[in-house]
Image (cartoon, grey):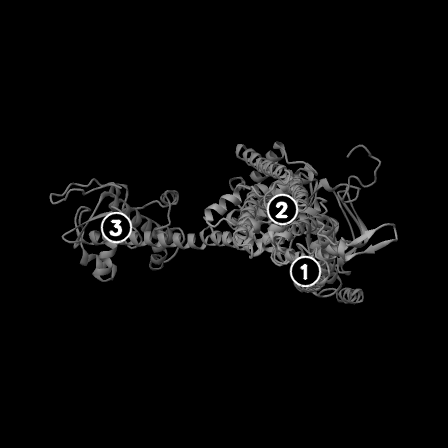
């Protein structure tokens, strides 16, 4: 990545400009502007329906944006996709699927392996190391349906670790996990940050958000505030984020959605 | 690591086997036509089942050969793709696709009557109509793709949900297909062979051209599944993640649907439109019940598909009037039933049997515990006898009931019975087990009251269940966590190592065979 030092914004892990995105032409996010510096652990906080997951999906192109752009280290998502790791919501998959814990973690290597090729021994070693980091190595050969919620989340985390990325997007990694897993996850996130990785984590629990994250992104269909946690975690800003949905925006969104049908 | 390499090797081996099999069959297929009868039905003049089976499985007759090769090929292609359909929860999509191809089959059939002598100089002659596999294939695939397209359009442009869109498409395409087929049947041409078999299938109608097409499609499917295994796996498991690593999930989905359409079309001749989706779903669902690894599921599904396919062809060889499709599907469903009832892990009967033997064991252990408690209350030695009456009182049951339990213990060598079953004596192994159970019970009570702060009068019922489940590891863990394991919360002694391994002093009245250790 050092071959073109002139490229603008190459040291900025994530830059979003005027991003509007939503489902079925009904916008959920409006004119998002965001610039996340390297090595930060950023919590994305907001009420239900604020578009937290949509933001992550829009960044990765899973939800098509209707305007604006997203740059990962100064390039488009697809150009830099190998530098991106993703932890989807645990409920988004069928845990009865006939694969083992190891198989799932190996999927984290698929982006590096490429088409037509099989994962190599080195990939397996990496996957094992990642499983070990989340203390799930003894479960490597288990079928995934025999796992508890916390263990499932650790498997997803191990898969993201196996992606060996520079920026991570995590959708509610703390949802429905036991206290031990929550502690394990947060220390892992801190460890990643120490290594200079950038992390954007959707979180729904306000009290812990204050302690867990360096920076907070208060989101409610638009960016209410973004900055260092101690500066953003104020009564006024939280009131602004949570105190009733922004009625005018959601009404306009409804109107736009109806016209699209 | 070794294990993983082995698994990889196995997967490779499986594919090599499949390819080898295909090669063998392709050689068989191109062997010149022999003088044997051209139709399965015509060769079934042997009367005994054994003779007929010998004739069938010796593959002397080309028609039998074609039927069997065709069944094997459709078993492979349907089994492989069926697995992905099952884990992607698209069974209804497969069903719709299989019905939607029917109008295409009819149009493809009619199209063989069209001859083009120039670019715009086309003529249609009913007399020219033949069963041209390539034309039928193309027509069917186009119809299948059109059906899928209709489902997607309905889903995206209206508020109709997927299930209704599928049902609607299935029915309308099928109706068009039946009308067209009926029209073809009424055409004044004697060359309608095979077309009427597309409804319920007839393996005997498969000829050399069909086999070539089936072989090509099956090879394509095997190759695609082998080459794109990891892409298919990850998009099936977690489509969002797959797209985040820039895999074109949508295109992979469409590609898979196209392959399913191919598989459906080559299977049509043998299985028929109505039941072809069962050959996609049933073998794969059977495999899904039996394993929880995707590559094993693929191999099993291929095995079940091939097995039921060949079985179906054989039955319709014996009884040419029965269409092949239902026979194959019956075979596949029978395999499913076997897996459902007798599967080693999730089978209904297996679970029932496991439950039964567990409750018998619990019953035995409870009786042993009662014997222990009777002795304990009398402050007696392990070698002392317990009367049937005492045991009945302790268990709060009738003497008849406990006498049955006592003889069950005797069968397992835990006790010996004396004085016509009125007196019960422990054997050393019975005494050891009784001590262990009582120890488990009391240790657990102690743990609940000490470590979990549960009141002493609340812990008995829980311990009643746990005592039968505690393994050695957990017991050792409990011993480590509890400082003093001499007395339980109710003040009774917890049997320790010394009690369990107390040497049995031989009693004078001991009959021969006493102390038999199992």
At 53% from the left and 32% from the top, the residue drawn is B2
Q: Are the residues tagged 1 and 3 within 8 Å (C-beta)?
A: no
Q: Is residue A96 visible?
A: no
Q: Are the residues tagged 2 and 1 within 8 Å (C-beta)?
A: no
Q: Does residue B121 sit above or below B511 in this rendering?
A: below
Image quarter where the C terminus of chain B lies is top left
Q: Which residue is mark 2?
A: B77
Q: Which residue is mark 3?
A: B409
Cα distance between the residues tagged 2 and 1: 49 Å
* Residue A157 relative to residue A13: left or right: left
Instruction: Please name which of the two marks, 2 or 3, marks the residue nearer to the observer.
Output: 2
Q: Does residue A203 sit above or below B158 in this rendering?
A: above
Cα distance between the residues tagged 2 and 3: 54 Å
* Residue B166 relative to residue A8: left or right: left
At 73% from the left and 48% from the top, the residue drawn is B134
The picture quadrant where one finds residue B65 is: top right
Cα distance between the residues tagged 1 and 3: 64 Å
Residues packed near mark 3 inside 10 Å, few (<14), some (14 to 19) or many (20 plus): many
Query: Mark 1 — on which chain does it sit?
Result: A
What SS does tag 1 mark? loop
Looking at the picture, how far across and down is residue B162, in whole percent? 67, 61
Q: Is residue B385 visible?
A: yes
Q: Are marks 2 and 3 on the same chain?
A: yes
Q: Are the residues tagged 2 and 3 within 8 Å (C-beta)?
A: no
Q: Which residue is mark 1?
A: A47
Residues packed near mark 2 inside 10 Å, few (<14), some (14 to 19) or many (20 plus): many
The picture quadrant where one finds residue A7 is: top right
């Amino acid at each position: 990545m050092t071959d073109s030092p002139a490229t603008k914004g190459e040291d900025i892990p994530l830059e979003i400009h005027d991003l509007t995105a939503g489902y079925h032409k009904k916008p959920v996010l409006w004119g998002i502007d965001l610039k996340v510096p390297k090595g930060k652990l950023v919590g994305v906080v907001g009420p239900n329906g604020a578009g937290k997951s949509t933001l992550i999906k829009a960044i990765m192109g899973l939800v098509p944006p209707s305007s604006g752009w997203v740059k990962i280290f100064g390039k488009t998502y697809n150009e830099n996709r190998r530098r991106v790791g993703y932890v989807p919501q645990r409920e988004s998959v069928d845990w009865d699927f006939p694969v083992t814990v190891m198989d799932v973690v190996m999927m984290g290597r698929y982006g590096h392996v490429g088409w037509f090729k099989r994962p190599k021994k080195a990939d397996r070693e990496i996957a094992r190391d990642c499983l070990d980091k989340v203390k799930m190595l003894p479960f490597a050969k288990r079928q995934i349906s025999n796992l508890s919620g916390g263990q499932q989340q650790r498997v997803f985390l191990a898969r993201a670790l196996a992606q060996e990325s520079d920026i991570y997007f995590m959708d509610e990694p703390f949802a429905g996990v036991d206290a031990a897993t929550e502690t394990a996850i947060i220390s892992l996130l801190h460890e990643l940050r120490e290594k200079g990785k950038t992390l954007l984590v959707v979180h729904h629990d306000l009290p812990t958000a204050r302690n867990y994250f360096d920076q907070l992104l208060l989101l409610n269909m638009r960016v209410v505030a973004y900055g260092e946690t101690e500066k953003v975690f104020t009564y006024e800003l939280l009131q602004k984020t949570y105190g009733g949905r922004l009625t005018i925006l959601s009404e306009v969104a409804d109107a736009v959605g109806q016209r699209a049908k | 690591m070794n294990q993983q390499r082995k698994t990889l090797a196995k997967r490779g081996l499986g594919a090599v086997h499949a390819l080898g099999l295909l090669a063998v069959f392709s050689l068989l297929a191109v062997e010149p036509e022999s003088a044997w009868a051209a139709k399965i039905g015509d060769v079934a003049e042997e009367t005994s089942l054994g003779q007929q089976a010998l004739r069938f499985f010796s593959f002397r007759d080309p028609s039998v050969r074609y039927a069997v090769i065709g069944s094997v090929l459709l078993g492979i292609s349907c089994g492989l793709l069926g697995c992905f359909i099952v884990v992607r929860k698209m069974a209804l999509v497969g069903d719709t696709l299989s019905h939607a191809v029917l109008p295409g089959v009819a149009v493809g059939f009619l199209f063989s009557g069209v001859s083009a002598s120039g670019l715009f100089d086309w003529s249609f002659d009913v007399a020219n109509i033949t069963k041209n596999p390539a034309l039928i294939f193309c027509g069917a695939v186009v119809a299948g793709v059109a059906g899928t397209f209709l489902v997607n359009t309905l889903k995206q442009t209206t508020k109709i949900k997927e299930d209704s869109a599928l049902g609607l498409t299935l029915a309308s395409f099928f109706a068009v297909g039946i009308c067209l087929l009926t029209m073809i049947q009424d055409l004044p041409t004697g060359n309608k062979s095979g077309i009427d078999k597309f409804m319920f299938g007839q393996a005997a109608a498969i000829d050399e051209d069909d086999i070539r097409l089936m072989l090509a499609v099956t090879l394509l499917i095997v190759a695609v599944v082998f080459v794109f295994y990891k892409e298919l796996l990850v998009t099936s498991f977690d489509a969002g993640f797959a797209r985040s690593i820039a895999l074109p999930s949508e295109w992979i989905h469409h590609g898979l649907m196209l392959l399913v359409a191919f598989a459906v079309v080559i299977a049509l001749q043998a299985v028929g439109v109505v039941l072809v989706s069962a050959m996609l779903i049933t073998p794969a669902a059977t495999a899904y019940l039996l394993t929880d690894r995707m590559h094993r599921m693929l191999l099993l599904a291929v095995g079940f598909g091939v097995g039921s396919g060949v079985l179906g062809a054989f039955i319709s060889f014996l009884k040419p009037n029965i269409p092949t499709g239902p026979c194959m599907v019956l075979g596949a469903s029978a395999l499913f039933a076997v897996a459902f009832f007798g599967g080693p892990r999730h089978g209904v009967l297996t679970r029932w049997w496991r439950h039964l033997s567990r409750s018998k064991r619990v019953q035995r252990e409870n009786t042993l515990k009662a014997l222990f408690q009777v002795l304990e209350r009398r402050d007696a030695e392990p070698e002392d006898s317990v009367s049937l009456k005492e045991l009945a009182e302790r268990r709060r049951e009738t003497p008849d009931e406990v006498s049955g339990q006592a003889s069950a213990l005797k069968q397992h060598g835990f006790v010996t019975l004396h004085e016509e079953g009125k007196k019960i004596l422990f054997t050393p192994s019975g005494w050891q087990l009784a001590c262990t159970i009582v120890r488990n019970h009391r240790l657990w009570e102690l743990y609940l009251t000490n470590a979990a702060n549960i009141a002493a009068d609340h812990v008995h019922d829980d311990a009643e269940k746990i005592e039968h489940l505690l393994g050695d590891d957990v017991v050792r863990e409990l011993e480590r966590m509890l400082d003093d394991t001499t007395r339980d919360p109710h003040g009774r002694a917890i049997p320790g190592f010394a009690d369990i391994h107390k040497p049995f002093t031989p009693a004078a009245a001991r009959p021969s065979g006493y102390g038999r250790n199992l």
